[in-house]
Amino acid sequence: MTCRLACIAAVLFLATIARAEETLEERFRAIVARFADESWAEREQAEQDLVALGAGARGLIEKEIESTRDAETKMRLRNALSELGKPRWATGFKAATEQAARSGRPIFLVCADGPIDQPRSRAGEALRRELGRPEVADLLNARFVLLWWNSGVEGAPDDRDPKAAAPEEGETGPTGCIGIYICTAKGVVRHFLPGWWSADTVREEVDLLKPILAATDAGEASRARAAVARQIAAEVEKKAADNPDEMAKPVEQSEIRRDVERRRRVVAAWTRGTDAVGERSADEYLRLRLRELTLRWTPPPPR
């Protein structure tokens, strides 16, 4: 029996490797074939999946544009080409959950202080800049359905003073609304990071989230999240202890100390974000938050 189980495990392992080693061109061809599907929703999802292949697919897309004679395929290829290296945002919460259900990808939800092209704070500017980096955009497109939520309200303060110091990672803007929510495909919040975060931090977070997103319920997700936070904290404190000379230097003079301080802020943010994690729908949570911001900043009507 043990030998039989070992053989089965070996077969499954080899099958997993075979799937992982599927070439980029094979995945590309499979996606392009779906542009002929009768379902409009399936063709839309195929376009999303093509963008998710990232910049490595650029040459394949360009070559296919030249060779295909199908008008819709050519249009969708051009659409995907124009979106490579840019975050591809879903058009609203309903569209995001529909895309997530079709693709099986979780939702990367950004709560921001205005539309994508209209930041209202230094933290908001930093958030847009970091998420707009091509390497980050390609990673997020491949792993998530992306959703931008505008929590900016009329009357809220704007702190974009060019003379002010650059914002520190984790800053949430003057209204406190900026943050990143990681949700299941059904829109349930599993992780929350308050504030804006650098490209380096976002890339690290994506890999750390795997056990949290794989959890079957809120309790398991909470335990996984706490375990990852402890892991980060242990790693960063070990790095600090192993480099006392670097930690004694001013932050601006030591790359090691800058990294330690950055990751300490991440640990603190994970702790602060615990209250936003559970079985509540992100849509419900954000609507409540938007109502609070509106009550706080909208001036009362004249009497």
Image (tube, rainbow, N blue to C red):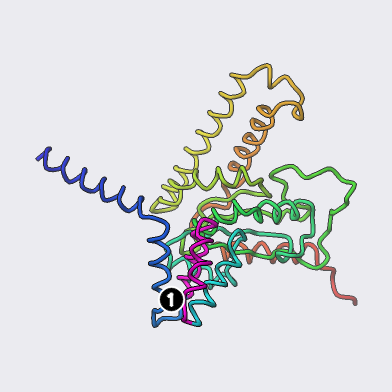
Count of marks overlaid on the render: 1
Q: Is residue 215 above or below residue 48?
A: above
Crowdedness of circle 1 by 10 Å Cα count: few (<14), some, many (20+)? Answer: many
Identify the residue at horizontal 43%, vertical 65% (top origin): 103
* Amino acid type, mark 1: Phe
Tag 1 residue = 35
Identify the residue at horizontal 60%, vertical 37% (top origin): 267
Identify the residue at horizontal 47%, vertical 65% (top origin): 49
From the top left corner, tell me how far across and down residue 295 is, in percent. 76, 65
Give the prevailing secondary structure in the magenta stretch. Answer: helix
From the top left corner, tell me how far across and down residue 192 is, in percent. 58, 51
On the image, which quarter does residue 116 sit in?
bottom right
From the top left corner, tell me how far across and down residue 227 is, in percent. 47, 37
Q: Is residue 198 above or below residue 119?
A: above
Q: Pick whichever, 77 or 297, lies toward us.
A: 77
Q: Is residue 299 above or below residue 131?
A: below
**SS for callout 1:** helix
Q: Pick whichever, 59 or 4, lies toward us.
A: 59
Residue 2 in the magenta stretch? The answer is no
The magenta region covers 44-70
**Residue at the left extreme?**
1
From the top left corner, tell me how far across and down residue 242 is, in percent. 59, 19
Q: Which quarter shows the C terminus?
A: bottom right
Residue 45 in the magenta stretch? The answer is yes
Identify the residue at horizontal 56%, vertical 23% (top origin): 238
Is 285 displayed left or right of 115 in the figure? left
Q: Which quarter shows the N terminus?
A: top left
Is 117 displayed left or right of 69 in the figure? right
